[in-house]
Amino acid sequence: QEFILSSRGNLFGGILIALASLYIKWSDNKKQKLTTPKTIDKTLHPYELVGNLTMIAAVSGVIGAKIFHNLENFDLFLSDPLGQLLSFSGLTFYGGLIFGAISVIWYAKKFNIKIKHLIDSSAPALMLAYGIGRIGCQMSGDGDWGIVNLAPKPDWMGFLPNWMWSYTFPHNVINAGIPIDGCVGNFCYQLANPVWPTAFYEVVMSLILFGILWFLRKRINIPGMLFFIYFIFNGIERFFIEKVRVNTEYNILGGITQAEIISFLLIITGFLGCIYLYAKRDQKI
């Protein structure tokens, strides 16, 4: 090997180099014989961009959800910045909604997609997706639950399972609470006191609101109106569920959560948007 690669010369080595040079020259000539590239104008329909829009919404949504979670739990973030950023747990819905919406609208504008029609088409799906996501929260016990509820179940709820009124979330995935007697292995904890199953309540409310939005989607002929109605529905639902939900509070206005602030802004934005679109219904905006 040393002889072949040395400067003393070698017939076999020379042949290899010659063959390599010939191959490079042949390959270069072949490329030059290829058909000259053409520029083709093609009309892209919105449905052809669904895959890109979905990916952009997913990636930006996760980033936004992570950022808002760390803002809401800033002390935890300061204690372990890298761990909090890379952790798969800790996602805030409104962060995902805001970042996802901004990114999708930015991308859609590049292709001249009508934004009002786009956001209207997403309104029922967003409401349904929120409800489906809360099913996972309820079943896994990821900490998305309510405050302690020691009140007896009302008689009118007698035919319903007890967990629909209050629940200790046994075998929850964050191992919160006290050990379960006789349980061995992972996820052997349950809450010491039962709490409101807020995730379940949000599933029910989201499905109802999805049904209303689905009913309205072909009965409203003002572009953009359905999305602002979704803002109102989502804001009202989340604002009131926060009253019995465990969450980090800011020390302002007697204690208020990030979700309460955003949901209140959604309600106001929704009403103002509906009023504006209705007032301009006969104009091209």
Image (cartoon, helix red, strand yellow):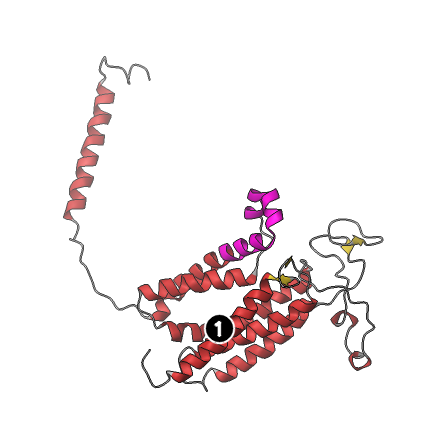
Q: Residue at x 78, y 58 (%)?
A: 191
In the rendered image, is residue 124 in sight?
Answer: no
Q: Is residue 147 left or right of residue 5?
A: right
The amino acid pointed to by label 1 is Thr
Q: Residue at x 40, y 84 (%)?
A: 279
**Which span is picked out in magenta?**
63-86
Q: Is residue 131 left or right of residue 14?
A: right
Please state the total of marks drawn on the protein image. Answer: 1
Q: Is residue 221 left or right of residue 172?
A: left
Q: How would you rate the neighbour count of disc 1 (Cα within 10 Å): few for under 14, some for 14-19, many for 20 or more? A: some
Q: Answer with the quarter of the image where residue 221 lies.
A: bottom left
Q: Residue at x 78, y 79 (%)?
A: 157
In the rendered image, is residue 67 in sight?
Answer: yes
Picture coordinates of residue 264, whole percent (x, y): 56, 70
Helix, strand or loop at mark 1: helix
Q: Is residue 82 left or right of residue 4?
A: right
Locate the C terminus by quadrant. bottom left
The secondary structure making up most of the magenta span is helix
Picture coordinates of residue 178, whole percent (x, y): 80, 53
**Residue toward you, 160 or 38:** 160
Reply yes or no: does residue 65 show up in magenta: yes
Locate the N terminus by quadrant. top left
Picture coordinates of residue 50, whole percent (x, y): 40, 66
Q: Residue at x 81, y 74 (%)?
A: 153
| Residue tagged 1 | 269
